[in-house]
Amino acid sequence: ETGVTQSPTHLIKTRGQQVTLRCSSQSGHNTVSWYQQALGQGPQFIFQYYREEENGRGNFPPRFSGLQFPNYSSELNVNALELDDSALYLCASSPGQGSYEQYFGPGTRLTVT
Amino acid sequence: GNSVTQMEGPVTLSEEAFLTINCTYTATGYPSLFWYVQYPGEGLQLLLKATKADDKGSNKGFEATYRKETTSFHLEKGSVQVSDSAVYFCALSDRRGSTLGRLYFGRGTQLTVWP
């Protein structure tokens, strides 16, 4: 059984640019959540997708957006990058109905200069 | 609202020492409680969980008991090893929340174990 995978592993962008991060959920999982983990902090919930629809959002501005595809993989898009967006971005998938335990991917380290 | 407060680190111990990392929570509903571990350069791994009051989660020698009366979920291990060196996160999930399994994390506690 393949776990949650994320790409790329590392990314360096310049302030003002746009970035897309990708996540493949674990087989059989229809729910994907995204978290931002700043250095030395705990992960903060960005949003969640359930069956291709956004199903909850944390305290993040609209320049953070996402998609979920029919195969339940997901993208996180961040526009107009700011220095404070530098963080580890974690994707987690869960089976959905009946079990909400989340399984995390290894993360994408984004550095904004 | 939902929040988690955990003991700030770093925590430095000698091998075979006893470990306690304190965690308390605030929740509006009926939370499930978790401990996650993060090794250097990696994502989060679920260490243990408890879904209702008085449940004890355990894994790899680590234990934590869900205490509703003190709103706590302290992590313990009787004899730590060098390989336990990592960052430990306490988290909760409100099972009645509309967002499926959304996790609220503490700030993390860095544990370093010396041989």
Image (cartoon, rainbow, N blue to C red):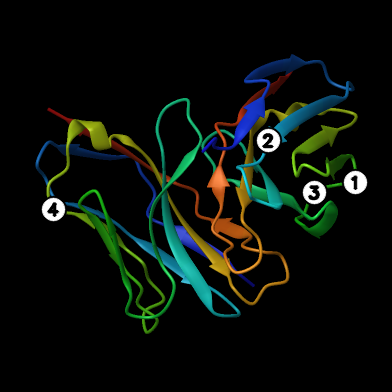
Categorize mark 2 by other alpha carbons within 10 Å: few (<14), some (14-19), many (20+): many
> Hey, which residue is sitting farthest bottom in the picture?
B69
Pointers 2 and 3 within a single chain:
yes
Disc 3 marks which residue?
A60
In front: B115, or A25?
A: A25
Q: Give the amino acid at mark 3.
A: Phe
Task: Give the distance between the C-alpha atoms of the residues marked 1 and 4, in whole angstroms.
Answer: 46 Å
The quadrant holding residue B45 is top left
Identify the disc placed on residue A62. Answer: 1
**Decide: marks 1, 2 in contact (CB < 8 A)?**
no
Residue B38 placed where, x, y %? 43, 38
Q: Secondary structure at mark 1?
A: loop
Q: Quadrant of the C terminus of chain A?
A: top right
Label 4 resides on the chain identified as B
Task: Give the distance between the C-alpha atoms of the residues marked 1 and 3, in whole angstroms.
Answer: 7 Å
**Decide: marks 4, 3 in contact (CB < 8 A)?**
no
Q: Secondary structure at mark 2?
A: strand
Residue A99 placed where, x, y %? 57, 64
Q: Earlier in the sequence, mark 2 or mark 3?
A: 2
Q: Earlier in the sequence, mark 1 or mark 2?
A: 2
Disc 2 marks which residue?
A24
Pointers 4 and 2 within a single chain:
no
Categorize mark 1 by other alpha carbons within 10 Å: few (<14), some (14-19), many (20+): few
